[in-house]
Amino acid sequence: MMEAALRQGAQALGLALNEGQIAQLLDFLALLQKWNKVYNLTAVRDPQEMLTHHLLDSLAAVAPLRRHLAGLPVGQGARLLDVGSGGGLPGVVFAICCPEVDVSCVDTVAKKAAFIQQAAAALKLPNLHGIHARVETLAGPFDVVSCRAFAALADFTAWSRQALAPHAVWLAMKGRHPSDEIAALPATVQVFHVEPLTVPGLDAERCIVWMRPAASEAVA
Ligand SMILES: C[S@@+](CC[C@H](N)C(=O)[O-])C[C@H]1O[C@@H](n2cnc3c(N)ncnc32)[C@H](O)[C@@H]1O
């Protein structure tokens, strides 16, 4: 049942996934369910809800991410940092769907970073790393810095600014268009696109806020 729903969801998203990736996504879902009680990874407990609210929700950001990566000078070898990754959302999903991208998931909670390391081994994902740290302490450089359900945009960008490579962008997954958070951003951060997302089976507003350091800051 899960597999059919996942395949249907990926198709609705227009996402090309191979058989190995479908298997890894299902295995990740099983790992999340298995370790959630021990590690307190997410408040979502129902398997069906985990599929729509976590897996498909994160998968909705994969095509936009792939599109962005295709235009990067680093091309295939991009490095991505997922901030406050918790149980690995969206970081693990990105690592599965973009195997050419090196994905680091950072979290202040040791057991969450340990879970990511465990998932990397179990799912055979050499491009996935769990880092136990505060994002403020990471130097990078990363080409994309993502987050989901992490913090207000002003805090997210301020805390991760030092981890950005010169051409890097922030990818913040949000619910409805966060006008107030955007208005509260400093002039040093430029929002260059707010991209609406549609999550199959989820009747809720979602978007990606794409940001980069403002040009004036880059020159200074
Ligand atoms: C609400 S959870 C979101 C988890 C996941 N991204 C998701 O969408 O399900 C936020 C996570 O951010 C982590 N966190 C909070 N402050 C942090 C910081 N300064 N650096 C790294 N992680 C942090 C917390 O430990 C928590 O796991």
Image: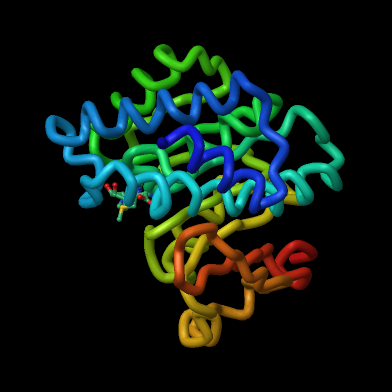
- Look at 71% across and 34% down and name the residue there: 78
Quarter of the rendering occupied by the C terminus: bottom right
Residue farthest toward the left in the current orientation of the protein: 38
Colour theme: rainbow
Quarter of the rendering occupied by the N terminus: top left
- Look at 32% across and 30% down and name the residue there: 113
- Report if residue 17 is visible in the image: yes
- Circle count: 0
The vertical placement of 102 against 16, above or below, is above
The percent position of residue 155, horizontal first and vertical second, equals: 42, 66
In depth, the one of 139 and 154 nearer the eye is: 154
- Report if residue 139 is visible in the image: no
Does residue 85 appear to the left or right of 128 in the view shown? Answer: left
In depth, the one of 108 and 75 nearer the eye is: 75
The vertical placement of 175 against 81, above or below, is below
In depth, the one of 156 and 52 nearer the eye is: 52
- Look at 29% across and 24% down and name the residue there: 114
The percent position of residue 206, horizontal first and vertical second, equals: 52, 69
- Look at 56% across and 48% down and name the residue there: 9
In depth, the one of 87 and 49 nearer the eye is: 49
The percent position of residue 202, horizontal first and vertical second, equals: 45, 63
The percent position of residue 88, horizontal first and vertical second, equals: 40, 38
The vertical placement of 160 against 79, above or below, is below
